[in-house]
Image (cartoon, rainbow, N blue to C red):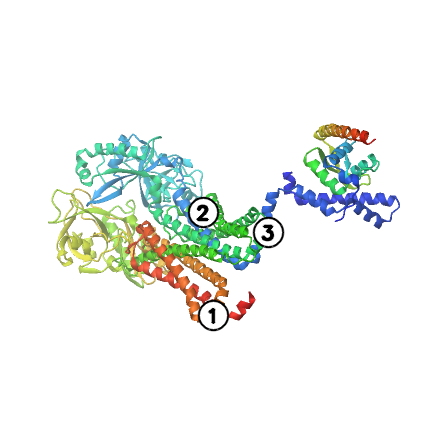
C-alpha cells in the first residue's frame, strides 16, 4: 500500500522513535494518541509520527519493560490504554539521550569542516 | 517475546484493536472540533493511522515464536492434507492405528505381567524356595518343601531375613447365611513378614499361632471382610466357623493385597507339630526375603549346606539320596509369571514385525505421494524454499500422521485390552492388573514417533534428491524410485511370510491339540461341582462315604442325567493332582523307592460320566466301596509299561508305598491329566471310600471331591438348580464350589495356545493384507510410469496378453524374492516359538509350503489388476495425452 512519505519520517531511525516516546512519558502516563501528538507538537510538526511504527514501537518497549501499559479512562471517559515509564525505562532514556548527543556532536564535527570547505 | 502474550495472542490482538479504535475515535473527534464533518474526520483519522491490519500483524508477529509457529502451520497443513487426500490418508492412518494399537496392547500386557514389579516392598529380595529333584530319571525343578525341610531351613538358613511356607486350599464357612466355600492359604508365621505387607487391621500370625494345639486364628482378605462382615470395624476378635471349627479373626489384609497369583478369602496358620516332624509330604511352597546383599546364588549355596545337614538324619537319608535334592531358589516374580513370558515375547515380536510392515507400507504410500508432489517441490525449491524447509514440512506431515495413527491405535488397544481382561480365557497371570498406564502411553508415543521417523525420513530423502535435481518435468527418477519401492515390497512380502508361517504353525499346533483324544468325551456335557464334607460336621469316615454315595444316587436320578460319579480330581484339574509311589508286585525291586504315579480316587460310575472307555475288566461298584475291597484300576499305559498287555494286568497286584496289596480289576484308556499338550501320565485309580490304609494309621476318607454329572442339559440354569436341590437334600450345609463344565477346564488347558493362535492369526492376516496392498501399489505405480512405453508396444503390435504377463511376471518376481527372504527368516526365527508348538516341527514343510503358496497367490492376484490395466491401454489416447 502506498505510504505518505515525509523526508524526515523516512530518516527517523528506530532508536529515535523509542527515545522520543520515552521522553514524552517522562511528563507522566499517556495513551498512544497523546504520545503521537506530544512528539509532533514538541518538534513543531517537523517530526511526523508514522503510526504504522508507533504502535509496534510501544509494543516493543513494553516487551522490554521500559514502559508499562495499563487500561485507564481517557479525558472523554473512554477506556484507553495508557503507558507509563518504568524505572528501567528512565535509565534507558538517560543512556539513549547521552548516546544521541554523542552521535549529534560527532556528526556536527564531521559536517562543520565540510561547511568551511564549501564556504 | 513475551510468553504470556504468546499464549494469549488472540486476546491481546483484541486489545490492540481496541487501542487503535480508540485512537481513531479521539483523532476524529479532534478533527470534528476543527470543523470537519464526522465522515471526513473519520476518513482523515484513518489516513493518519495508516493500515491497522498491518500494525496488528506486526505486533502479532512480535508475539510469536517463529519456529513453533511454522511448525504449527505445517501441522495444520498436514491435517488439511490428511483431510483432503483420503485415498492416501485413510489406508495410512488405519494401518498405522492397527500396527501401533496392536503393539500398545501387547506392551500393556507385557508391562503388567512381566515388567511391573510385584506389589510388595523391595520385591527384588523376594525368592520362591523350591528344590530340584530327580524322579524316575526325570528332573523336576519346582519340588515343594516338606515341613521337615521348612523346620531345617527356618533354623539353619543364614541368608533369609524372613522365611515361610504356604499351601493353597479351600474351606467351608458356615454360621450366618448360606454355607460358602472360600479360597484359603495356609501359611507359617514367616510368610507375611517376608512379603512385607502389614495387615490393615489387627496383626500378623505369630509363632504361637502355628503351634499344634493353639487357638485357631484367621486373617481375612479386605474383599471378604467387606462382603461377609460389611466392613465391620470391630471384626478383630470375632469368631467364625471355618470347616465347622471356631476361628478367631486376628486381622484384615489391606485392599491392595494379593497373594502371588491367588486371591484367598481367608489366611490360616499352618500348624506345626511340637515334636519332630514325621509326615513328609512335599507340598509346601516356600517364600523368603533375602537379607540385604545376599544373591540368589549365595542363598542357594547356603541352603545346600542346610539341606545336606538335614539329609544326614537317619529317617530321611534314603529319600534324600534317591531323589537327589538340590535347592532351587528363584526370584519370586518368576514363580508368579510362570511360562507366560514365552507367549508374550513371541507376540511382542510378531507385532513389532507388523509395525515394521506398516511402516514399510506407509513409507510406500508417502513415497508415491511425494512422487506426485515432485513438481510442487521442484517449483518451491526453484522459488527459494530450502531443502530444510521442505524436509521440515515432510517431517511434520509424517509426525502428524504418526501421532494421529497412534491416537487411533490407543483407542484400539484400549478396546482390545478391555476385551482380553473381560474374557479372561487367555489364562495369563496378573491379568487383572493389565491396563493402559503411563508406561503404555509413553510406549505409544515412542511407537508413533519412531514409525513417523521411519517412513518420514524415506520421504525426505526422496524429496531431497528430487529437489536437488530441480527437474519439474523429468521422468528420469522413475527407475530409481522403482528400485526403492521394489526393495520395500520384497521386505514386506518377506515379513508377511514370517508372520504367516508363525500363524500357520500355531494353527497346526491347535489342530494337533484338538485331535488328541483326551480320555474323556463331550466335555461340554459334563457338569462338575466340587464339594467338601467337613470333619467337624461329620467326623465318622463311614458316614462320609454313605453321604457321598447318596449324593451320586440323587444326582444320577435327575431327569436327563446319563451318568454321575466323583473323583478326588477330574482330568486337567491340576490343583487337585495327587501322586503316590506305587509298587508293582514282582517288578519293583525290594528296598528301592518305587516310581511316583498319578493316583486318583474315583467312585463307581465316574468313568461312565467322564466318557473314559473301559478297555478290559470292570468298573468299581458301590459294593466294592462299602466292603472296602482292596482293588484298583490302572490306565492303559500303566498296564502296558508293567505287564505288556492290558489283559495281562487283571489279577496283578500293586500297592501304595508300604500299604496293603491291591488287585487290578480293570484297565481304562489313557487320560491326558496334565493337559492335552502333555503326555498322558500312567495313572492308578483307587476306589472311593475308606482307603486301604497303611498299617498303623487310622482309616481315612477323602472329604473333598469333584462330582461329574453327564447330561445334555449341562450348564443350563434349571439343571444347576436341580443339582443344588439334590445336593442340599442330602446335606443342607454343603457349599457348591467350582461349578463349571469340564469343557471350561479342557479349553483352559489349551488357552495359551489358542491365545497365541488368535493373536498370531490376526498379525498374520494383517501382514498378508499389507503385503498385498504393497505389491498392488508398486505394480500400479510401475504401470502408471510405463504407460507410454506400453502404448508404444501395443501400437507396434504387442499382444495385450503379453503386456499383461510382463507385469504379472514382475509381481511374481517380487513375491519370489520376498518369499525366499521370508522362508529363511522364518526358519531362523521359528525355534524361538518351538516351546509354543505342539505336534508340529518348527520347520514343518507343509506350513512353510502352504504359507509360501498363499503369499505367491496373493501377490499374483494383486499384480493382476494393474497388469490388466496396462494391457488395456488405448495407445492413441495415451500418446496424445502426454
Q: Position of residue B29 (x, y in %)?
A: 84, 44
Circle 1 is placed at which residue position?
B794
- B181, above or below B852, in the image: above
Q: Is label 2 in a helix, a strand or a loop?
A: loop
| Residue occupying image coordinates x 40% and y 46% | B110
Q: Chain of mark 2?
A: B
Q: CA distance from mark 2 to mark 1?
A: 60 Å
Earlier sequence position, callout 2 versus callout 1: 2
Q: Position of residue B493 (x, y in %)?
A: 40, 57
Q: Are marks 1 and 3 in contact (CB under 8 Å)?
A: no
- B90, above or below A45, in the image: below
Q: Position of residue B359 (x, y in %)?
A: 46, 52
Q: Position of residue B858 (x, y in %)?
A: 40, 63
Circle 2 is placed at which residue position?
B435
Circle 3 is placed at which residue position?
B382
Q: Chain of mark 1?
A: B
For label 2, count other residues whose C-alpha is less than 10 Å away and answer few (under 14), some (14-19) or many (20+): some
> In the image, which is nearer the foreground, mark 2 or mark 1?
1
Amino acid at each position: 500500500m502506498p505510504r505518505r512519505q515525509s523526508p524526515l519520517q523516512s530518516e527517523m531511525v528506530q532508536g529515535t522513535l523509542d527515545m522520543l516516546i520515552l521522553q514524552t512519558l517522562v511528563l507522566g502516563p499517556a495513551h498512544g494518541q497523546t504520545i503521537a501528538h506530544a512528539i509532533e507538537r514538541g518538534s513543531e510538526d517537523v517530526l511526523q509520527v508514522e503510526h504504522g511504527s508507533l504502535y509496534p514501537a510501544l509494543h516493543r518497549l513494553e516487551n522490554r519493560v521500559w514502559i508499562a501499559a495499563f487500561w485507564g479512562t481517557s479525558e472523554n471517559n473512554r477506556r484507553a490504554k495508557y503507558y507509563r515509564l518504568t524505572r528501567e525505562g528512565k535509565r534507558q532514556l538517560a543512556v539513549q539521550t547521552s548516546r544521541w548527543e554523542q552521535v549529534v556532536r560527532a556528526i556536527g564535527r564531521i559536517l562543520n569542516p565540510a561547511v568551511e570547505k564549501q564556504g | 517475546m513475551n510468553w504470556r502474550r504468546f499464549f494469549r495472542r488472540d486476546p491481546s490482538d483484541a486489545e490492540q484493536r481496541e487501542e487503535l479504535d480508540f485512537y481513531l475515535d479521539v483523532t476524529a473527534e479532534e478533527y470534528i472540533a476543527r470543523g470537519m464533518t464526522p465522515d471526513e474526520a473519520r476518513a482523515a483519522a484513518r489516513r493518519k493511522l495508516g493500515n491497522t491490519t498491518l500494525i496488528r500483524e506486526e505486533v502479532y508477529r512480535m508475539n510469536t515464536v517463529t519456529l513453533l509457529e511454522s511448525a504449527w502451520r505445517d501441522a495444520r497443513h498436514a491435517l488439511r492434507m490428511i483431510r483432503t487426500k483420503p485415498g492416501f490418508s485413510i489406508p495410512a492412518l488405519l494401518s498405522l492405528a492397527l500396527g501401533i494399537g496392536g503393539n500398545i496392547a501387547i506392551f500393556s500386557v507385557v508391562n503388567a505381567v512381566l515388567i511391573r514389579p510385584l506389589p510388595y516392598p523391595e520385591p527384588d529380595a523376594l525368592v520362591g524356595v523350591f528344590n530340584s529333584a530327580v524322579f524316575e530319571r526325570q528332573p523336576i525343578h519346582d519340588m515343594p518343601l516338606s515341613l521337615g525341610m521348612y523346620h531345617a531351613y527356618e533354623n539353619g538358613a543364614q541368608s533369609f531375613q524372613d522365611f515361610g511356607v504356604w499351601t493353597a486350599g479351600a474351606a467351608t464357612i458356615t454360621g450366618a447365611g448360606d454355607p460358602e466355600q472360600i479360597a484359603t492359604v495356609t501359611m507359617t508365621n514367616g510368610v507375611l513378614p517376608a512379603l512385607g505387607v502389614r495387615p490393615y487391621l489387627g496383626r500378623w500370625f505369630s509363632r504361637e499361632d502355628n503351634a499344634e494345639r493353639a487357638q485357631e486364628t484367621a486373617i481375612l482378605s479386605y474383599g471378604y471382610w467387606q462382603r461377609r462382615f460389611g466392613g465391620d470395624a470391630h471384626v478383630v476378635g470375632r469368631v467364625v466357623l471355618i470347616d465347622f471349627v471356631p476361628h478367631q479373626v486376628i486381622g484384615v489384609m489391606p485392599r491392595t493385597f494379593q497373594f502371588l497369583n491367588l486371591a484367598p478369602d481367608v489366611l490360616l496358620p499352618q500348624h506345626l507339630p511340637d515334636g519332630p516332624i514325621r509326615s513328609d509330604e512335599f507340598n509346601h511352597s516356600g517364600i523368603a526375603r533375602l537379607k540385604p546383599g545376599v544373591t540368589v546364588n549365595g542363598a542357594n549355596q547356603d541352603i545346600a549346606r542346610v539341606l545336606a545337614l538335614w539329609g544326614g538324619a537317619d529317617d530321611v537319608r534314603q529319600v534324600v539320596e534317591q531323589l537327589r535334592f538340590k535347592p532351587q531358589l528363584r526370584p519370586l516374580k518368576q514363580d508368579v509369571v510362570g511360562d507366560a513370558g514365552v507367549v508374550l515375547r513371541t507376540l511382542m515380536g510378531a507385532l513389532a514385525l507388523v509395525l515394521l510392515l506398516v511402516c514399510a507400507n506407509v513409507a510406500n504410500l508417502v513415497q508415491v505421494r511425494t512422487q506426485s508432489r515432485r513438481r510442487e517441490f521442484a517449483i518451491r525449491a526453484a522459488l527459494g524454499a530450502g531443502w530444510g524447509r521442505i524436509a521440515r514440512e515432510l517431517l511434520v506431515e509424517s509426525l502428524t500422521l504418526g501421532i494421529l495413527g497412534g491416537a487411533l491405535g490407543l483407542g484400539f488397544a484400549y478396546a482390545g485390552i478391555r476385551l482380553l481382561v473381560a474374557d479372561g480365557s487367555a489364562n495369563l497371570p496378573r491379568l487383572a492388573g493389565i491396563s493402559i498406564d503411563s508406561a503404555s502411553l509413553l510406549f505409544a508415543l515412542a511407537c508413533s514417533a519412531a514409525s513417523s521417523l521411519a517412513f518420514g525420513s524415506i520421504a525426505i530423502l526422496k524429496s531431497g534428491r528430487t529437489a536437488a535435481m530441480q527437474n519439474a518435468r523429468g521422468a528420469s527418477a522413475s527407475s530409481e524410485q522403482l528400485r526403492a519401492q521394489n526393495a520395500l515390497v520384497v521386505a514386506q512380502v518377506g515379513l508377511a511370510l514370517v508372520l504367516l508361517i508363525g500363524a500357520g504353525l500355531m494353527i497346526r499346533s491347535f489342530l494337533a491339540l484338538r485331535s488328541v483324544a483326551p480320555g474323556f468325551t463331550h466335555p461340554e456335557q459334563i457338569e462338575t461341582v466340587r464339594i467338601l464334607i467337613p470333619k467337624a460336621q461329620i467326623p465318622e469316615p463311614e458316614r462320609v462315604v454313605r453321604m457321598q454315595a447318596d449324593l451320586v444316587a440323587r444326582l444320577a436320578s435327575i431327569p436327563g442325567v446319563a451318568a454321575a460319579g466323583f473323583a478326588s480330581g477330574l482330568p486337567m484339574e491340576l490343583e487337585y493332582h495327587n501322586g503316590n509311589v506305587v509298587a508293582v508286585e514282582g517288578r519293583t525291586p525290594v528296598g528301592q523307592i518305587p516310581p511316583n504315579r498319578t493316583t486318583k480316587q474315583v467312585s463307581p460310575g465316574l468313568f461312565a460320566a467322564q466318557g473314559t472307555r473301559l478297555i478290559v475288566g470292570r468298573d468299581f461298584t458301590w459294593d466294592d466301596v462299602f466292603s472296602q475291597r482292596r482293588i484298583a484300576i490302572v490306565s492303559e499305559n500303566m498296564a502296558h509299561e508293567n505287564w505288556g498287555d492290558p489283559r495281562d494286568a487283571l489279577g496283578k497286584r500293586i500297592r501304595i508305598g508300604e500299604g496293603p496289596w491291591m488287585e487290578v480289576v480293570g484297565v481304562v484308556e489313557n487320560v491326558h491329566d496334565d493337559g492335552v499338550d502333555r503326555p498322558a501320565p500312567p495313572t492308578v485309580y483307587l476306589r472311593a471310600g475308606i482307603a486301604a490304609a497303611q498299617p498303623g494309621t487310622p482309616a481315612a476318607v477323602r472329604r473333598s471331591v469333584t462330582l461329574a454329572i453327564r447330561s445334555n442339559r449341562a450348564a443350563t440354569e434349571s439343571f444347576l438348580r436341580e443339582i443344588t436341590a439334590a445336593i442340599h437334600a442330602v446335606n443342607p450345609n454343603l457349599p457348591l464350589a467350582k461349578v463349571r463344565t469340564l469343557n471350561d477346564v479342557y479349553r483352559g488347558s489349551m488357552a495359551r495356545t489358542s491365545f497365541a493362535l488368535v493373536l498370531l492369526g490376526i498379525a498374520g492376516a494383517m501382514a498378508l493384507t499389507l503385503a498385498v496392498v504393497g505389491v498392488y501399489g508398486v505394480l500400479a505405480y510401475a504401470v502408471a510410469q510405463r504407460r507410454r512405453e506400453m502404448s508404444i508396444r501395443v501400437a507396434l503390435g504387442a499382444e495385450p496378453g503379453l503386456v499383461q504377463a510382463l507385469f504379472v511376471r514382475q509381481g511374481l518376481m517380487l513375491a519370489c524374492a520376498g518369499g525366499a527372504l521370508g522362508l529363511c527368516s522364518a526358519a531362523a526365527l521359528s525355534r524361538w516359538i518351538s516351546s509354543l508348538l505342539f505336534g508340529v516341527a518348527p520347520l514343518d514343510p507343509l506350513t512353510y509350503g502352504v504359507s509360501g503358496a498363499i503369499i505367491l497367490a496373493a501377490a499374483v492376484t494383486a499384480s493382476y489388476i494393474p497388469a490388466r490395466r496396462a494391457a488395456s491401454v488405448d495407445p492413441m489416447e495415451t500418446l496424445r495425452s502426454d
